[in-house]
Amino acid sequence: MSDKLILWAIVIAYMLFVFFKGVMKVRKIGSTDDFLVAGRNVNWFLLFCTMGATIIGGGYSIGAIGKTYEWGILMLLVSTGGYLHFIFSGLFVAPQFRDAKLYTVAGYFGHRFGEKPRFFVLILSLLFSVFIVAAQMAAFGTVTAAILPDLADSLHMLQWAILVSGIMVVIYSTAGGLMAVIHTDLFQFIVLLAGFVITLAFCIPDIADSYNSDTGKFVPSRFGMADIPQPQKFAEQLIQDSNSVTTHIRSHLDKDEINAIRRVADRDTSTSNQRSLIVTLNKLLDEPKLYDSTAFARVNLTKQTLERLNRNEIQEGRDLRRLNLSLIQDAYPEQISRNREISADFFKVEGGKGWLFLITTFLAFLLGETFAPGYATRYCVGKNIRETRLGIAGVGFFLAFTFPVILFFIALFARIQFPDIDPQQALPMVVDQLHNPVVGGLIIGALLMAVMSSADSALNSSTAIFVKDLFEHQLGWKDKGDGRMLLIARICTAALGLAAILIAVLWSDIIGLLLFTYHIWAPAIILPVVVGALWKKRSAKLTQHIFITMISATVLTLLYRGILSLKTNFDVLLFGDNAYSIMESLDPAVFGVVVSCIVFVSLRFLPKLIPAKKTE
């Protein structure tokens, strides 16, 4: 049985196993509370795993490794912000949700601040829920394209990926509600985390071997476009030279590879053709019979090449690739830059992008998804306050101090092995490099199921928003214990899921709408929730100030986005270049949260600082 067949058999078997585990939970659903909040009977470990699986979707796995491949240590630092807010939520916010037996963020605003803020959050929640479910469904196609780049240009295949995966999510979410979601998350989180740890274990020896202790730097072990400063001239030499070493190297190339090199030699130096040249060179690195004493007789071999040749054992794998790379570098010293090192910016704290970029990007990660509906639902499901704190704050601590480090070293391995690839291909290329179909199958299956976990969480929280905030609270529909509201919840889940699949298949720019919802969510939500968690007093004036803050922050954030949009889409400039440079480095969500803080502080404390006018 081929490695590819084993890999995909494991992927399909794993996905079907998780799917049926979710569907079987239908037997334990007897009420809307079972369906929407898993009966509020989830222990800390299940809560830990379901939060972890929800967090690590496509963005915090493939996307995060891709960015780490680009930014290096900078991404390691800023991505911790995406986990830190769970520590605060677990310690201070989630216990209040659980104690009040809430279901949604809008319910919290009603509980803490009254009807006006609750209604405003309901509107935001409805917008947020519809777009985020569609975006998570669309992520199936994005992740499939990243894992299977050969299918990335096939629109129909990506649409089928969205359709099949989306329907699986809709079926088990409709059957078992949040209880099904949480129990499938248990397997998804454990397998995904184990997959990344095993991948890291495979990568570490290669990373250590690539470290040059004399210079204190890492040296890539494959060719990249930066290694060939004059690709057209080098391609000409490979095609035209008749010397023994070039003739020998050509004998290891097939017709298509020679034609690809010829296109570069004929001055067609497009990026795709240059990449074909690099791919051909890197294929030679795995050739066991590349070295021939007669062919390389006239080549001035370096000391490091001779040392590798003089080893008595048969060289294969990593050692073979290093020998062949050194041989090719020796054969064409004028055409290939030798021993290129990874950029120093990769190891700088601010990544060579400046401290302002570091701070604003960290804040964007910290604030972007804080108190999002999919996370807030989990605040409500613990057995008690203690289990809730342990599960949510625990996963925040654990992921913040482990996961970015794991991803950094996997990305470093990708930089060493594949110095010139699309960053989004970093993780799939590393998995392929492992040459282990079992590990590869588990990782690919876990990545696809991680996206499913994010999608089913969004779908469940959206159902809770419609059922509890809209149908029951606003429209006055009551749960009379006859199963009617449970049926409505299931219908709502199925309808929302199918609508999201349709939007994801037909609407390619759904990610733009998702960013829009994030940008208006954070400014309106974060400060009031923090105030509610830390400020125990209640008053009509506080509610008024919170409501004004929410409206002001939302309106000003929309205005801020509008000014940036005028420049980007219509080339309309309202300010100077320096102003736009600062604005473009500040995420709209961060801007909005800063505005909300300024407005709230002004409303609360400025009147106390202004002396009251004396009356006659």
Image (cartoon, grey):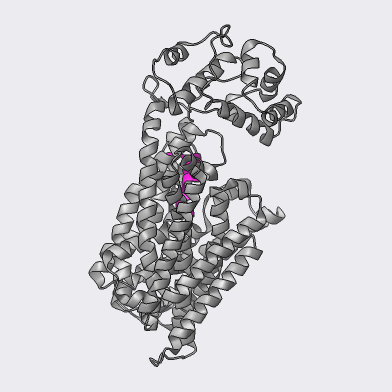
| Residue 58 forms part of the magenta stretch | yes
* 525 vs 488, nearest the viewer: 488
Q: Quadrant of the C terminus?
A: bottom left
Q: Position of residue 138 (x, y in %)?
A: 57, 61
> Residue shown at 56%/20% (left/top)?
337
Image position of 521 with respect to 334: above or below = below
Q: Position of residue 597 (x, y in %)?
A: 42, 64
> Residue shown at 48%/48% (left/top)?
7
Q: Quadrant of residue 446?
A: bottom left
**Residue 591 visible in the displayed image:** yes
* 579 vs 102, nearest the viewer: 102
Residue 550 falls left or right of residue 386:
right
Image position of 259 with respect to 52: above or below = above
| Residue 616 forms part of the magenta stretch | no
Q: Main secondary structure of the magenta part?
A: helix
Q: Quadrant of residue 16?
A: bottom left
Image position of 17 with respect to 284: above or below = below
* 464 vs 516, nearest the viewer: 464
Q: Position of residue 416 (x, y in %)?
A: 47, 32
Image position of 531 with respect to 259: above or below = below
Q: Which residues are magenta?
A: 57-73
